[in-house]
Image (tube, rainbow, N blue to C red):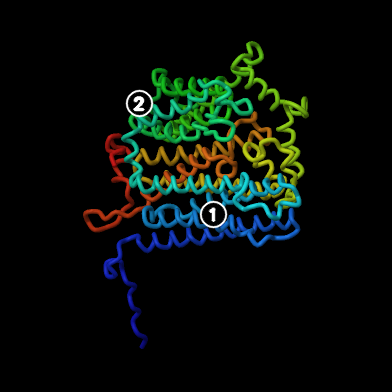
Amino acid sequence: MTAAATPAASPATTGEQPGVRLARSRRNAELSLLLLAMVLVAAYGATVEATMLDTVTPDFWIPAAALGAVFLGLHLVIRFLAPFADPALLPAVALLNGLGVGFLRRLDLSDAVPAEREGLAVFAGTGGRQLAWTLVSVILAAGLLVILRDHRSVSRYAYTLGLAGIVLVMIPAVLPSRFSEINGAKLWIKFGDTFSIQPGEFAKLALLVFFAYYLVRKREVLSLASRRFLGIDFPRGRDLGPVVVVWLISLLVLVFEKDLGTSLLYFGMFVVTLYIATERVSWLIIGLVLFFGGAYLAYILGDLVGGPFANFYLRAEIWLDPFADPHNDGYQLVQGLLALGTGGLFGAGPGGGQPGLLPEVQNDFIFAGLGEEIGLFGLSALLVIYLLIVERGLRAALAVRDSFGKLVAGGLAFTLGLQVFVIVGGISKLIPLTGQTTPFLSAGGSSLMANWLLIAVLLRVSDGAHRPVTGGGGTARPSGGPPEQLHGAPTEVIRP
Protein backbone atom coordinates (compact mmCIF):
# COMPACT_ATOMS: atom_id res chain seq x y z
CA MET A 1 0.00 0.00 0.00
CA THR A 2 1.47 3.31 -1.05
CA ALA A 3 1.64 6.35 1.14
CA ALA A 4 -0.86 9.10 0.46
CA ALA A 5 0.50 12.05 -1.51
CA THR A 6 1.24 15.10 0.58
CA PRO A 7 -1.01 17.98 -0.53
CA ALA A 8 0.77 21.04 -1.88
CA ALA A 9 1.10 23.90 0.55
CA SER A 10 -1.38 26.68 -0.14
CA PRO A 11 -0.65 30.40 0.23
CA ALA A 12 -2.85 30.39 3.33
CA THR A 13 -0.80 27.67 5.06
CA THR A 14 2.57 29.11 4.06
CA GLY A 15 1.64 32.65 5.03
CA GLU A 16 2.52 33.84 1.52
CA GLN A 17 0.40 36.49 -0.15
CA PRO A 18 -1.27 35.40 -3.43
CA GLY A 19 0.89 36.37 -6.39
CA VAL A 20 4.19 36.79 -4.50
CA ARG A 21 5.64 33.65 -6.02
CA LEU A 22 4.54 34.87 -9.47
CA ALA A 23 6.21 38.24 -8.87
CA ARG A 24 9.47 36.59 -7.85
CA SER A 25 9.55 34.38 -10.95
CA ARG A 26 8.79 37.34 -13.26
CA ARG A 27 11.65 39.38 -11.85
CA ASN A 28 14.05 36.47 -12.12
CA ALA A 29 13.02 36.04 -15.75
CA GLU A 30 13.64 39.74 -16.30
CA LEU A 31 17.11 39.46 -14.76
CA SER A 32 17.99 36.44 -16.93
CA LEU A 33 16.84 38.19 -20.11
CA LEU A 34 18.72 41.33 -19.10
CA LEU A 35 21.97 39.38 -18.67
CA LEU A 36 21.42 37.72 -22.07
CA ALA A 37 20.90 41.14 -23.67
CA MET A 38 24.19 42.44 -22.24
CA VAL A 39 26.01 39.31 -23.47
CA LEU A 40 24.70 40.08 -26.98
CA VAL A 41 25.84 43.71 -26.66
CA ALA A 42 29.33 42.57 -25.58
CA ALA A 43 29.46 40.08 -28.48
CA TYR A 44 28.52 42.85 -30.91
CA GLY A 45 31.30 45.07 -29.57
CA ALA A 46 33.84 42.26 -29.83
CA THR A 47 32.81 41.53 -33.43
CA VAL A 48 33.16 45.20 -34.38
CA GLU A 49 36.69 45.33 -32.95
CA ALA A 50 37.68 42.05 -34.61
CA THR A 51 36.53 43.39 -37.99
CA MET A 52 37.96 46.90 -37.75
CA LEU A 53 41.10 46.29 -35.68
CA ASP A 54 41.90 42.67 -36.58
CA THR A 55 42.01 42.04 -32.84
CA VAL A 56 39.78 42.22 -29.78
CA THR A 57 41.07 44.65 -27.16
CA PRO A 58 40.98 43.73 -23.46
CA ASP A 59 38.47 46.55 -22.88
CA PHE A 60 35.79 45.39 -25.31
CA TRP A 61 33.49 44.29 -22.47
CA ILE A 62 33.54 47.59 -20.55
CA PRO A 63 30.65 49.36 -22.40
CA ALA A 64 28.42 46.30 -21.96
CA ALA A 65 29.42 46.02 -18.29
CA ALA A 66 28.72 49.72 -17.68
CA LEU A 67 25.33 49.43 -19.35
CA GLY A 68 24.63 46.23 -17.42
CA ALA A 69 25.32 47.98 -14.12
CA VAL A 70 22.96 50.83 -15.04
CA PHE A 71 20.18 48.49 -16.12
CA LEU A 72 20.71 46.28 -13.08
CA GLY A 73 20.04 49.31 -10.89
CA LEU A 74 16.74 49.90 -12.70
CA HIS A 75 15.93 46.19 -12.38
CA LEU A 76 16.34 46.46 -8.59
CA VAL A 77 14.01 49.47 -8.50
CA ILE A 78 11.43 47.50 -10.49
CA ARG A 79 11.89 44.44 -8.27
CA PHE A 80 10.98 46.41 -5.15
CA LEU A 81 8.62 49.11 -6.46
CA ALA A 82 6.91 47.44 -9.45
CA PRO A 83 7.30 43.69 -8.85
CA PHE A 84 4.35 42.72 -11.06
CA ALA A 85 5.47 44.71 -14.11
CA ASP A 86 6.01 42.97 -17.44
CA PRO A 87 9.40 41.17 -17.37
CA ALA A 88 10.13 41.58 -21.09
CA LEU A 89 10.04 45.38 -21.36
CA LEU A 90 13.32 46.23 -19.63
CA PRO A 91 15.48 43.55 -21.37
CA ALA A 92 14.10 44.41 -24.81
CA VAL A 93 14.74 48.13 -24.40
CA ALA A 94 18.15 47.48 -22.82
CA LEU A 95 19.18 45.40 -25.85
CA LEU A 96 18.19 48.17 -28.27
CA ASN A 97 19.91 50.81 -26.16
CA GLY A 98 23.05 48.69 -25.87
CA LEU A 99 23.24 48.01 -29.60
CA GLY A 100 22.80 51.73 -30.24
CA VAL A 101 25.74 52.54 -27.96
CA GLY A 102 27.78 49.81 -29.65
CA PHE A 103 27.08 51.14 -33.14
CA LEU A 104 27.89 54.70 -32.11
CA ARG A 105 31.25 53.50 -30.74
CA ARG A 106 31.76 51.73 -34.06
CA LEU A 107 31.27 55.15 -35.75
CA ASP A 108 33.84 56.64 -33.38
CA LEU A 109 36.34 53.95 -34.39
CA SER A 110 35.64 54.67 -38.05
CA ASP A 111 36.27 58.40 -37.58
CA ALA A 112 39.52 57.89 -35.66
CA VAL A 113 42.90 57.71 -37.34
CA PRO A 114 43.63 53.99 -38.05
CA ALA A 115 46.79 54.04 -35.96
CA GLU A 116 44.85 55.40 -32.95
CA ARG A 117 41.75 53.21 -33.13
CA GLU A 118 43.01 50.50 -30.81
CA GLY A 119 43.72 53.04 -28.09
CA LEU A 120 40.43 54.94 -28.42
CA ALA A 121 38.97 55.44 -24.94
CA VAL A 122 35.78 53.55 -24.18
CA PHE A 123 33.97 56.65 -22.92
CA ALA A 124 35.13 58.98 -25.71
CA GLY A 125 33.22 60.33 -28.68
CA THR A 126 29.53 59.91 -29.52
CA GLY A 127 29.39 56.44 -28.00
CA GLY A 128 30.72 57.73 -24.69
CA ARG A 129 28.19 60.56 -24.65
CA GLN A 130 25.41 58.10 -25.36
CA LEU A 131 26.57 56.04 -22.38
CA ALA A 132 26.28 59.13 -20.20
CA TRP A 133 22.82 59.95 -21.59
CA THR A 134 21.76 56.36 -20.91
CA LEU A 135 22.76 56.76 -17.26
CA VAL A 136 20.77 60.00 -16.98
CA SER A 137 17.76 58.49 -18.76
CA VAL A 138 17.64 55.36 -16.61
CA ILE A 139 17.94 57.47 -13.44
CA LEU A 140 14.96 59.55 -14.62
CA ALA A 141 12.97 56.38 -15.34
CA ALA A 142 13.80 55.00 -11.89
CA GLY A 143 12.87 58.33 -10.30
CA LEU A 144 9.51 58.29 -12.07
CA LEU A 145 8.81 54.80 -10.70
CA VAL A 146 9.70 56.04 -7.21
CA ILE A 147 7.45 59.10 -7.43
CA LEU A 148 4.57 57.63 -9.44
CA ARG A 149 3.23 54.76 -7.32
CA ASP A 150 -0.19 54.76 -9.06
CA HIS A 151 -0.57 55.69 -12.72
CA ARG A 152 -4.02 57.18 -12.05
CA SER A 153 -2.57 59.90 -9.82
CA VAL A 154 -1.05 61.68 -12.84
CA SER A 155 -4.58 62.50 -14.07
CA ARG A 156 -4.74 65.23 -11.40
CA TYR A 157 -2.30 67.27 -13.47
CA ALA A 158 -3.81 66.53 -16.89
CA TYR A 159 -4.64 70.12 -17.85
CA THR A 160 -1.29 71.40 -16.60
CA LEU A 161 0.50 68.73 -18.63
CA GLY A 162 -1.63 69.54 -21.67
CA LEU A 163 -0.66 73.22 -21.50
CA ALA A 164 2.99 72.31 -20.94
CA GLY A 165 2.88 69.99 -23.95
CA ILE A 166 1.51 72.70 -26.25
CA VAL A 167 4.14 75.17 -25.04
CA LEU A 168 6.93 72.64 -25.61
CA VAL A 169 5.66 71.95 -29.14
CA MET A 170 5.45 75.63 -30.05
CA ILE A 171 8.73 76.90 -28.60
CA PRO A 172 10.94 75.78 -31.55
CA ALA A 173 8.42 77.19 -34.05
CA VAL A 174 8.55 80.73 -32.62
CA LEU A 175 12.30 80.83 -32.03
CA PRO A 176 14.58 82.27 -34.74
CA SER A 177 16.00 79.63 -37.05
CA ARG A 178 19.52 80.01 -35.69
CA PHE A 179 18.25 78.80 -32.29
CA SER A 180 15.96 76.00 -33.44
CA GLU A 181 16.67 74.74 -36.97
CA ILE A 182 18.84 71.74 -37.83
CA ASN A 183 18.82 70.21 -41.32
CA GLY A 184 15.78 72.22 -42.35
CA ALA A 185 13.50 71.21 -39.43
CA LYS A 186 12.75 73.55 -36.50
CA LEU A 187 12.49 70.96 -33.73
CA TRP A 188 15.30 71.92 -31.36
CA ILE A 189 16.32 74.51 -28.81
CA LYS A 190 20.02 75.10 -29.36
CA PHE A 191 22.38 76.31 -26.66
CA GLY A 192 25.51 77.27 -28.55
CA ASP A 193 27.04 74.88 -31.07
CA THR A 194 27.44 71.83 -28.83
CA PHE A 195 24.19 71.30 -26.92
CA SER A 196 20.54 71.15 -27.98
CA ILE A 197 17.31 69.61 -26.75
CA GLN A 198 14.21 68.50 -28.62
CA PRO A 199 11.22 69.57 -26.48
CA GLY A 200 8.74 67.76 -28.70
CA GLU A 201 10.01 64.43 -27.36
CA PHE A 202 8.72 65.35 -23.89
CA ALA A 203 5.61 67.06 -25.27
CA LYS A 204 4.25 63.78 -26.62
CA LEU A 205 4.16 62.30 -23.09
CA ALA A 206 2.45 65.34 -21.58
CA LEU A 207 -0.07 65.61 -24.40
CA LEU A 208 -0.95 61.93 -24.24
CA VAL A 209 -1.82 62.18 -20.54
CA PHE A 210 -4.09 65.11 -21.34
CA PHE A 211 -5.68 63.26 -24.29
CA ALA A 212 -6.35 60.21 -22.09
CA TYR A 213 -7.93 62.29 -19.32
CA TYR A 214 -10.06 64.30 -21.74
CA LEU A 215 -11.29 61.24 -23.64
CA VAL A 216 -12.17 59.33 -20.48
CA ARG A 217 -14.46 62.20 -19.50
CA LYS A 218 -15.90 62.77 -22.99
CA ARG A 219 -15.94 59.29 -24.51
CA GLU A 220 -19.71 58.81 -24.15
CA VAL A 221 -20.38 62.02 -26.08
CA LEU A 222 -17.76 61.19 -28.73
CA SER A 223 -19.23 57.69 -29.14
CA LEU A 224 -22.60 59.02 -30.29
CA ALA A 225 -23.34 58.48 -33.96
CA SER A 226 -25.41 60.73 -36.22
CA ARG A 227 -25.64 58.62 -39.37
CA ARG A 228 -24.53 55.28 -40.80
CA PHE A 229 -22.66 55.12 -44.11
CA LEU A 230 -21.33 51.92 -45.73
CA GLY A 231 -21.92 50.06 -42.49
CA ILE A 232 -19.86 52.55 -40.41
CA ASP A 233 -21.35 54.82 -37.74
CA PHE A 234 -19.99 58.35 -38.09
CA PRO A 235 -19.99 60.86 -35.21
CA ARG A 236 -22.14 63.95 -34.97
CA GLY A 237 -20.78 67.07 -36.63
CA ARG A 238 -20.77 69.00 -33.35
CA ASP A 239 -18.38 66.41 -31.84
CA LEU A 240 -15.69 66.92 -34.49
CA GLY A 241 -14.29 69.98 -32.69
CA PRO A 242 -11.45 68.26 -30.74
CA VAL A 243 -10.25 66.40 -33.83
CA VAL A 244 -10.28 69.56 -35.94
CA VAL A 245 -8.33 71.47 -33.27
CA VAL A 246 -5.63 68.78 -33.04
CA TRP A 247 -5.57 68.57 -36.85
CA LEU A 248 -4.95 72.31 -37.10
CA ILE A 249 -2.18 72.09 -34.50
CA SER A 250 -0.54 69.25 -36.44
CA LEU A 251 -0.71 71.33 -39.63
CA LEU A 252 0.91 74.26 -37.83
CA VAL A 253 3.70 71.91 -36.75
CA LEU A 254 4.03 70.68 -40.34
CA VAL A 255 4.24 74.22 -41.73
CA PHE A 256 6.20 76.17 -39.13
CA GLU A 257 8.45 73.40 -37.76
CA LYS A 258 8.84 71.92 -41.24
CA ASP A 259 8.55 68.31 -40.12
CA LEU A 260 6.05 65.75 -41.37
CA GLY A 261 7.04 63.10 -38.82
CA THR A 262 6.29 65.17 -35.73
CA SER A 263 3.00 66.34 -37.22
CA LEU A 264 1.98 62.76 -38.01
CA LEU A 265 3.08 61.59 -34.57
CA TYR A 266 0.92 64.07 -32.64
CA PHE A 267 -2.16 63.71 -34.79
CA GLY A 268 -1.90 59.93 -35.05
CA MET A 269 -1.45 59.66 -31.28
CA PHE A 270 -4.66 61.59 -30.65
CA VAL A 271 -6.76 59.79 -33.27
CA VAL A 272 -5.72 56.32 -32.13
CA THR A 273 -6.33 57.22 -28.47
CA LEU A 274 -9.76 58.48 -29.56
CA TYR A 275 -10.39 55.17 -31.33
CA ILE A 276 -9.36 53.19 -28.22
CA ALA A 277 -11.75 55.28 -26.10
CA THR A 278 -14.77 55.06 -28.41
CA GLU A 279 -14.09 51.86 -30.44
CA ARG A 280 -15.43 53.59 -33.54
CA VAL A 281 -13.60 52.98 -36.82
CA SER A 282 -15.12 56.17 -38.20
CA TRP A 283 -12.67 58.25 -36.14
CA LEU A 284 -9.73 56.49 -37.83
CA ILE A 285 -11.23 57.17 -41.26
CA ILE A 286 -11.84 60.84 -40.43
CA GLY A 287 -8.31 61.16 -39.04
CA LEU A 288 -6.69 59.64 -42.12
CA VAL A 289 -8.72 61.83 -44.48
CA LEU A 290 -7.88 64.97 -42.50
CA PHE A 291 -4.16 64.26 -42.24
CA PHE A 292 -3.52 63.20 -45.82
CA GLY A 293 -5.76 65.98 -47.09
CA GLY A 294 -3.78 68.50 -45.03
CA ALA A 295 -0.44 67.09 -46.21
CA TYR A 296 -1.54 67.24 -49.85
CA LEU A 297 -2.76 70.82 -49.36
CA ALA A 298 0.63 71.77 -47.87
CA TYR A 299 2.35 70.18 -50.88
CA ILE A 300 0.21 72.14 -53.36
CA LEU A 301 0.76 75.40 -51.48
CA GLY A 302 4.49 74.69 -51.39
CA ASP A 303 4.50 74.52 -55.17
CA LEU A 304 2.28 77.54 -55.72
CA VAL A 305 3.13 79.84 -52.81
CA GLY A 306 6.38 78.56 -51.26
CA GLY A 307 7.22 80.37 -48.05
CA PRO A 308 6.65 78.17 -44.98
CA PHE A 309 5.38 75.34 -47.23
CA ALA A 310 8.55 75.22 -49.35
CA ASN A 311 10.47 72.83 -47.08
CA PHE A 312 7.72 70.21 -47.11
CA TYR A 313 7.37 70.54 -50.88
CA LEU A 314 11.11 69.95 -51.30
CA ARG A 315 11.03 66.85 -49.08
CA ALA A 316 8.05 65.49 -51.02
CA GLU A 317 9.86 66.06 -54.32
CA ILE A 318 12.95 64.24 -53.01
CA TRP A 319 10.73 61.39 -51.87
CA LEU A 320 9.06 61.12 -55.28
CA ASP A 321 12.38 60.98 -57.18
CA PRO A 322 15.55 61.05 -55.05
CA PHE A 323 17.71 60.13 -58.06
CA ALA A 324 16.74 63.32 -59.88
CA ASP A 325 19.47 65.10 -57.90
CA PRO A 326 21.50 62.31 -56.24
CA HIS A 327 24.53 64.50 -55.47
CA ASN A 328 22.68 67.37 -53.79
CA ASP A 329 19.10 67.36 -52.48
CA GLY A 330 18.59 63.61 -52.86
CA TYR A 331 22.04 62.61 -51.60
CA GLN A 332 21.02 61.52 -48.10
CA LEU A 333 18.10 59.34 -49.20
CA VAL A 334 20.05 57.86 -52.11
CA GLN A 335 22.94 56.88 -49.85
CA GLY A 336 20.51 55.35 -47.39
CA LEU A 337 18.87 53.24 -50.10
CA LEU A 338 22.29 52.16 -51.40
CA ALA A 339 23.34 51.17 -47.87
CA LEU A 340 20.24 49.04 -47.42
CA GLY A 341 20.75 47.48 -50.84
CA THR A 342 24.43 46.78 -50.16
CA GLY A 343 23.56 45.05 -46.89
CA GLY A 344 21.44 42.46 -48.66
CA LEU A 345 20.10 39.61 -46.55
CA PHE A 346 22.97 39.10 -44.11
CA GLY A 347 24.94 42.37 -44.27
CA ALA A 348 28.66 43.05 -44.38
CA GLY A 349 29.06 42.14 -40.72
CA PRO A 350 29.43 44.46 -37.69
CA GLY A 351 32.22 46.89 -38.52
CA GLY A 352 32.39 45.83 -42.17
CA GLY A 353 30.29 48.55 -43.80
CA GLN A 354 30.88 52.18 -44.72
CA PRO A 355 28.35 54.10 -42.62
CA GLY A 356 30.53 57.22 -42.80
CA LEU A 357 29.11 57.85 -46.28
CA LEU A 358 25.66 58.39 -44.78
CA PRO A 359 24.86 61.94 -43.65
CA GLU A 360 23.45 62.01 -40.10
CA VAL A 361 24.02 58.27 -39.69
CA GLN A 362 24.22 58.70 -35.92
CA ASN A 363 20.70 60.21 -35.85
CA ASP A 364 18.14 59.98 -38.63
CA PHE A 365 19.86 57.28 -40.68
CA ILE A 366 21.19 54.93 -38.00
CA PHE A 367 18.79 52.23 -39.17
CA ALA A 368 20.25 52.40 -42.69
CA GLY A 369 23.81 52.30 -41.32
CA LEU A 370 22.98 49.24 -39.25
CA GLY A 371 21.20 47.67 -42.22
CA GLU A 372 24.39 47.74 -44.29
CA GLU A 373 26.18 45.70 -41.63
CA ILE A 374 23.52 43.34 -40.25
CA GLY A 375 21.39 42.96 -43.37
CA LEU A 376 17.68 42.40 -43.81
CA PHE A 377 17.60 39.58 -41.26
CA GLY A 378 19.27 41.74 -38.63
CA LEU A 379 16.96 44.69 -39.25
CA SER A 380 13.97 42.33 -39.12
CA ALA A 381 15.17 41.15 -35.71
CA LEU A 382 15.37 44.75 -34.49
CA LEU A 383 11.86 45.42 -35.78
CA VAL A 384 10.61 42.30 -33.98
CA ILE A 385 12.08 43.67 -30.73
CA TYR A 386 10.24 46.96 -31.29
CA LEU A 387 7.09 44.96 -32.07
CA LEU A 388 7.54 43.03 -28.82
CA ILE A 389 7.75 46.29 -26.82
CA VAL A 390 4.61 47.63 -28.51
CA GLU A 391 2.78 44.33 -27.96
CA ARG A 392 3.71 44.29 -24.27
CA GLY A 393 2.47 47.85 -23.93
CA LEU A 394 -0.84 46.94 -25.56
CA ARG A 395 -1.07 43.88 -23.33
CA ALA A 396 -0.72 46.12 -20.28
CA ALA A 397 -3.49 48.34 -21.70
CA LEU A 398 -5.78 45.34 -22.07
CA ALA A 399 -5.01 44.00 -18.60
CA VAL A 400 -5.41 47.19 -16.55
CA ARG A 401 -8.93 47.70 -15.25
CA ASP A 402 -9.33 51.49 -15.34
CA SER A 403 -10.05 53.39 -18.55
CA PHE A 404 -7.43 56.07 -17.94
CA GLY A 405 -4.70 53.43 -17.68
CA LYS A 406 -5.95 51.73 -20.82
CA LEU A 407 -5.75 54.93 -22.83
CA VAL A 408 -2.34 55.92 -21.46
CA ALA A 409 -0.72 52.52 -22.03
CA GLY A 410 -2.37 51.97 -25.40
CA GLY A 411 -1.49 55.47 -26.58
CA LEU A 412 2.14 55.22 -25.46
CA ALA A 413 2.60 51.82 -27.09
CA PHE A 414 1.11 53.03 -30.35
CA THR A 415 3.17 56.24 -30.26
CA LEU A 416 6.38 54.24 -29.96
CA GLY A 417 5.35 52.01 -32.86
CA LEU A 418 4.33 54.99 -34.97
CA GLN A 419 7.68 56.70 -34.35
CA VAL A 420 9.52 53.60 -35.54
CA PHE A 421 7.27 53.43 -38.62
CA VAL A 422 7.87 57.10 -39.43
CA ILE A 423 11.68 56.85 -39.33
CA VAL A 424 11.94 53.43 -41.04
CA GLY A 425 9.39 54.52 -43.64
CA GLY A 426 11.46 57.63 -44.35
CA ILE A 427 14.79 55.89 -44.93
CA SER A 428 13.16 53.16 -47.04
CA LYS A 429 11.31 55.72 -49.24
CA LEU A 430 7.88 54.60 -48.08
CA ILE A 431 7.07 58.14 -46.87
CA PRO A 432 8.94 61.48 -47.09
CA LEU A 433 11.97 61.87 -44.82
CA THR A 434 11.35 63.18 -41.33
CA GLY A 435 13.44 64.54 -38.49
CA GLN A 436 12.48 61.77 -36.07
CA THR A 437 15.08 59.70 -34.24
CA THR A 438 15.00 55.92 -33.95
CA PRO A 439 13.96 55.18 -30.35
CA PHE A 440 16.81 53.92 -28.12
CA LEU A 441 19.23 53.57 -31.08
CA SER A 442 19.92 57.09 -32.30
CA ALA A 443 22.32 59.46 -30.58
CA GLY A 444 20.70 62.22 -28.55
CA GLY A 445 19.71 62.81 -24.97
CA SER A 446 16.20 64.21 -25.50
CA SER A 447 14.88 61.20 -27.38
CA LEU A 448 16.57 58.74 -25.02
CA MET A 449 15.25 60.40 -21.85
CA ALA A 450 11.70 60.78 -23.19
CA ASN A 451 11.50 57.19 -24.39
CA TRP A 452 12.86 55.80 -21.12
CA LEU A 453 10.20 57.82 -19.29
CA LEU A 454 7.65 56.27 -21.67
CA ILE A 455 8.88 52.81 -20.71
CA ALA A 456 8.69 53.70 -17.01
CA VAL A 457 5.01 54.65 -17.40
CA LEU A 458 4.32 51.36 -19.23
CA LEU A 459 6.05 49.47 -16.41
CA ARG A 460 3.91 51.27 -13.84
CA VAL A 461 0.67 50.56 -15.69
CA SER A 462 1.70 46.91 -16.21
CA ASP A 463 2.45 46.56 -12.51
CA GLY A 464 -0.92 48.04 -11.61
CA ALA A 465 -2.66 45.68 -14.02
CA HIS A 466 -1.18 42.51 -12.51
CA ARG A 467 -0.74 43.47 -8.86
CA PRO A 468 -3.03 41.31 -6.65
CA VAL A 469 -5.13 43.11 -4.06
CA THR A 470 -6.87 41.27 -1.26
CA GLY A 471 -10.60 41.92 -1.38
CA GLY A 472 -13.10 41.76 1.42
CA GLY A 473 -13.53 37.99 1.05
CA GLY A 474 -9.80 37.31 1.27
CA THR A 475 -9.41 36.54 -2.42
CA ALA A 476 -6.96 38.23 -4.74
CA ARG A 477 -7.94 40.30 -7.75
CA PRO A 478 -5.92 42.54 -10.08
CA SER A 479 -5.58 46.12 -8.99
CA GLY A 480 -6.74 49.15 -10.94
CA GLY A 481 -10.25 49.39 -9.58
CA PRO A 482 -13.33 47.19 -9.50
CA PRO A 483 -14.69 45.78 -12.78
CA GLU A 484 -17.55 48.25 -12.86
CA GLN A 485 -15.05 51.07 -13.44
CA LEU A 486 -14.71 49.95 -17.03
CA HIS A 487 -18.06 51.49 -17.81
CA GLY A 488 -18.62 53.65 -14.76
CA ALA A 489 -18.38 57.33 -14.20
CA PRO A 490 -15.15 58.92 -15.40
CA THR A 491 -14.50 60.45 -12.00
CA GLU A 492 -14.38 56.93 -10.52
CA VAL A 493 -12.05 55.71 -13.23
CA ILE A 494 -9.34 58.29 -12.72
CA ARG A 495 -9.41 58.55 -8.93
CA PRO A 496 -6.15 57.03 -7.53
Marks 2/1 in contact by CB < 8 Å: the verdict is: no
**In the rendered image of this protein, does residue 356 appear above or below residue 21?**
above
User: SS class of the residue under badge 2?
Assistant: helix
Is residue 264 visible to the viewer in this orientation of the structure?
no
Residue nearest the observer in this picture, 255 or 120? 120
Left/right placement of residue 481 relative to residue 327 reads: left
Left/right placement of residue 217 relative to residue 55 reads: left
Mark 1: amino acid: Leu
x and y percentages locating residue 457 in the rendered image: 42, 44
Q: Quadrant of residue 324?
A: top right
Mark 2: amino acid: Val
The structure residue drawn at horizontal position 37% and vertical position 46%, both measured from the top left corner, is: 400
Residue furthest to the left in view is: 472
Is residue 237 visible to the viewer in this orientation of the structure?
yes
x and y percentages locating residue 403 in the rendered image: 36, 39
x and y percentages locating residue 343 in the rendered image: 74, 46
Residue with the mark numbered 2: 221
Residue furthest to the top in view is: 305
Front position among marks 2 and 1: 1
Residue with the mark numbered 1: 67
Residue nearest the observer in this picture, 125 or 231? 125
Left/right placement of residue 463 relative to residue 436 reads: left
The structure residue drawn at horizontal position 53% and vertical position 39%, both measured from the top left corner, is: 447
**In the rendered image of this protein, does residue 58 appear above or below residue 477?**
below
User: SS class of the residue under badge 1?
Assistant: helix
Task: Give the total number of marks visible in the rendering.
Answer: 2
Give the Cα distance between marks 2 and 1: 48 Å
Q: In which quarter of the image is the N terminus?
A: bottom left
Residue nearest the observer in this picture, 463 or 147? 147
